[in-house]
Amino acid sequence: MAELDLLIRQRAAVKGNLTRQKSYLEQIQDEEISERIVVELKLRLSKVEVLLDKFYEIQDEIESKVEENQLGAQEQERENFEVSFYSTAADFQEILNSIETRNVSQNDSNGMVPTENVSSVVPQKIVQLPALKLPTFSGRYDAWVEFRDAFKALIHENSGLTNVQKFYYLRSSLKDDSLNLIESIPVSDSNYQD
């Protein structure tokens, strides 16, 4: 039981790290975005991206050690973390994309060559909508069309997401046999094609 307690504490540390990153994003919402903050956003996003794999590793261990009747609660832990993770990663990417887009359009309208100075760029206020629950697909044929249409509309055709993010969303939406088919494929830009 001591090993399970240790794993639960490790999971709490990962969840706490994600919460701190989300809090950081909320703090900078009303700030002027300087070049330093852009660099920090990129560094923090790279740290956020590794949290999912770390969480999965710990959560898999926890699920292998708990009683059968506790698996439902553990699956809910996994789902809650995934929703929070993808929301936070998307918020980071959305801010970075917004800054990049503004810099390009600002430089295009001025006829200037892009520079790295973004000290005068102020981000748009991000409205925090309730999280959408992504559909899940276990491989049942009768559920395929509904899953495909929803995933395509919410994720695949979303130009604000990178291929890596789309692949993460796909993995988190699959379960059972359908997840087993792609679980060994590394998450990379080239492994998710439009």
Image (cartoon, helix red, strand yellow):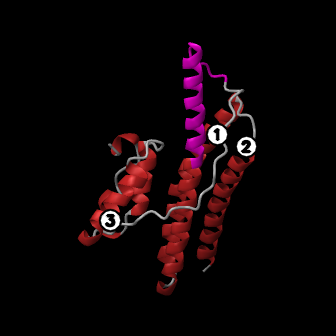
Q: Quote the CA–CA distance across marks 2 and 3.
A: 38 Å
| Rendering quarter of residue 130 | bottom right
Query: Which residue does the numbered mark 3 point to in the structure image?
Result: 146
The residue drawn where x is 43% and y is 60% is: 172
Marks 1,3: beta carbons within 8 A: no
Q: Main secondary structure of the magenta part?
A: helix
- Going from N to C along the chain, the mark reached first, 1 or 3, is 1
* Disc nearest the viewer among 1 and 3: 3
Q: Which element is circle 3 on?
A: helix
Q: Which residue is tagged 2?
A: 28
Q: Quadrant of the N terminus?
A: bottom right
Residue with the most extreme front position: 109
Q: Which residue is mark 1?
A: 41
Viewport quadrant of the C terminus: top left
Label 1 amino acid? Answer: Leu
User: Total of numbered circles in the picture?
Assistant: 3
The residue at the far left in this view is: 141
Secondary structure of residue under mark 1: helix
Q: Residues within 10 Å of mark 1 (few under 14, many from 20)?
A: many
Residue 116, x across and y down, in percent: 63, 22
Which portion, as a residue range, is magenta? 91-117
Residue 85 location, quadrant = bottom right
Mark 2–mark 1 distance (CA, rounded to whole Å): 10 Å
* Label 2: how many Cα within 10 Å (few below 14, some 14–19, many 20+): some
Front one among 169 and 113: 113
The mark that comes first in sequence, 2 or 3, is 2
At horizontal 59% and vertical 26% (from top left) the residue drawn is 103
Q: Residues within 10 Å of mark 3 (few under 14, many from 20)?
A: few
Of callouts 2 and 1, the N-terminal one: 2
Residue 109 colored magenta? Answer: yes
What amino acid type is highlighted by mark number 2? Ile
Instruction: Identify residue type, mark 3.
Output: Glu
